Image (spheres, helix red, strand yellow):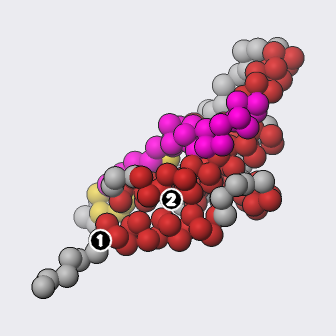
Amino acid sequence: SAMAKRDRNGLPLSTASSALPEPVASQGEAERVAGALIDLLASVPDLGGRLGELLWSEETIREVQPSGNVTLRRSLSPDLAILLRTGQAVQMAVVIGIKERRAQSMGGLAEPTAALAYDAMCNAVCRLCPSSWLRSRELRISPTENADAQVARFVLSQHAVPRSS
């Protein structure tokens, strides 16, 4: 089968993918499960963010060209993108949860790499779902601007040089 076209970050460009598995449930069963997932996502504000963290993975691939030049490229797992394509309501609930988790827990992440990875996931989701990302501003609890500033402060604090007396 042909590979889906991807952007420079490895994200699928099209909304339909030949790599998606065939449905195993009837339409009615799928709608019931999706409804239960939406209810669950709505009842736990940052669950979408927790699912995003679980499904998100990126890997840097180092390639040596015949010329000897080394190139680095990112390879992203399609799992989060597949979840975001299950339906508009699920997509919105996951996007809101991702924003809430970023705002609520960014300061609790022990390593700058974890903060940067979560921020990379947020940026990828913003690119994958721009209309949901924008519309979620009306539905979220924590302002995105505050979360952006919190991520920046956290990363900067991890790289701060201690002052000598």
The residue depicted at 70 percent of the width and 30 percent of the height is 40
Q: Going by the picture, which residue comes out furthest to the bottom?
A: 165
> Residue at 76% across / 30% down in the picture?
39
Q: Between residue 114 and residue 55, name the one nearer to us.
A: 114
The residue that appears at 29% across and 71% down in the rendered structure is: 159
Under mark 2, the amino acid is Asp
Q: Which residue is mark 1?
A: 159
Instruction: Name the side, left or right, on which 97 lies relative to 88.
Output: left
Instruction: Find disc 2 in the rendering and name its residue.
Output: 119
Q: Which residues are magenta?
A: 38-63
Which part of the image, by quadrant, shows the C terminus? bottom left
Number of the label disc, if any, that sits on residue 91? none
Quadrant for the N terminus, please: top right
**Mark 1: few, some, or many residues within 10 Å (few <14, many ≥20)?**
few
* Residue 123 relative to residue 28: left or right: left
Q: Secondary structure at mark 2?
A: helix
Task: Tell me the amino acid under the disc marked 1.
Answer: His
Across and down, in percent, residue 38 comes to: 76, 33
Rendering quarter of residue 72: bottom left
